[in-house]
Each structure stands twice: as C-alpha cells, then as structure tokens.
Image: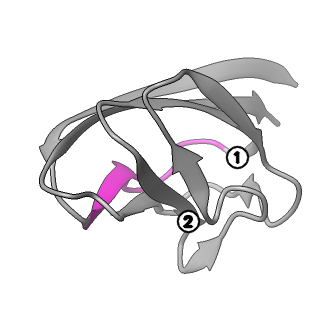
Amino acid sequence: GKRCELVCRFRGIANSSQLVDPAATFPYTIVKLNHEGSEALTANVRIASTSVTGLSAVAVTTSNADSSATAANVVVAGDRLTVIFTDIATTADVVLKLVVDRD
C-alpha cells in the first residue's frame, strides 16, 4: 500500500458533525490522527455510522498530538467519513491530519 495524508482545517466550528470525505474514491485504512485545536475539545472519527476504535473520543488540545486507530478503521470505496466535535465552549479552529494507508 501507499501512505497518504488527508488534512482538514475547520474554522469557527461549534459542536457539530463535519464531513471529511462524502464518498471515498478508493479504499484505505486509517492509521492515526494528528490533531491540534485552538481550545480543548473532543473529536470522534466515524466511517459511515461506526466510530473508529481509538479515535472515538480523542482529546484535542492546543498541543499537537497523535492518536492511533486500532480497529474499525477500514474505509471502502463509497464510504462516508465524518468527525463529530463535542465539548467546544464557544467556537474553535481545528486542524486534523488523518494518516492512511491506501490499499
């Protein structure tokens, strides 16, 4: 496989579900999530309606950090990828980098 990165920048978001990939073009496996935000919040990475194990309650802070995906992390062509943000006090800016292995 080939390692790739999907970088997403969210500006001024409140608690919400944000679309990352509406319909995957090719299959891939999520390896880890690199994350940093303007304030502390929680992120839940979901493939269709299933949360990725290890990325279902990521504590995003103002420090850059990685969280590993451990199971339920395989995306097939056509799958929808979303991130649900919670615990945002008002609004936040967030940068997420999904490291994936393209199958």
The magenta segment is: 16-26
**Residue located 80% across and 19% down the image:** 2
Decide: is 38 above or below 86: above
Pointer 1 residue: 27
**Residue located 77% across and 58% down the image:** 54
Between 78 and 21, the residue placed more toward the observer is: 21
- Amino acid carrying label 2: it is Arg
Pointer 2 residue: 46
Measured as percent of width and height from the top left, residue 74 is found at 77, 56
Q: Quarter of the image holding residue 87?
A: bottom left
Between 48 and 85, the residue placed more toward the observer is: 85
**Residue located 21% across and 42% down the image:** 92
| C-alpha separation, residue under disc 2 versus residue under disc 1 | 15 Å
Give the number of the mark in front: 2 or 1. 2
- Location of the C terminus (image quadrant): top right
Between 64 and 4, the residue placed more toward the observer is: 64
**Residue located 56% across and 50% down the image:** 59
> Which badge, 2 or 1, comes first in the chain's sequence?
1
Is residue 91 found inside the magenta-colored segment of the image?
no
Q: Quarter of the image holding residue 72?
A: bottom right
As drawn, is 18 to the left or to the right of 46?
Answer: left
Q: Which numbered tag is attached to residue 86?
A: none
Measured as percent of width and height from the top left, residue 42 is found at 47, 57
- Amino acid carrying label 1: it is Pro
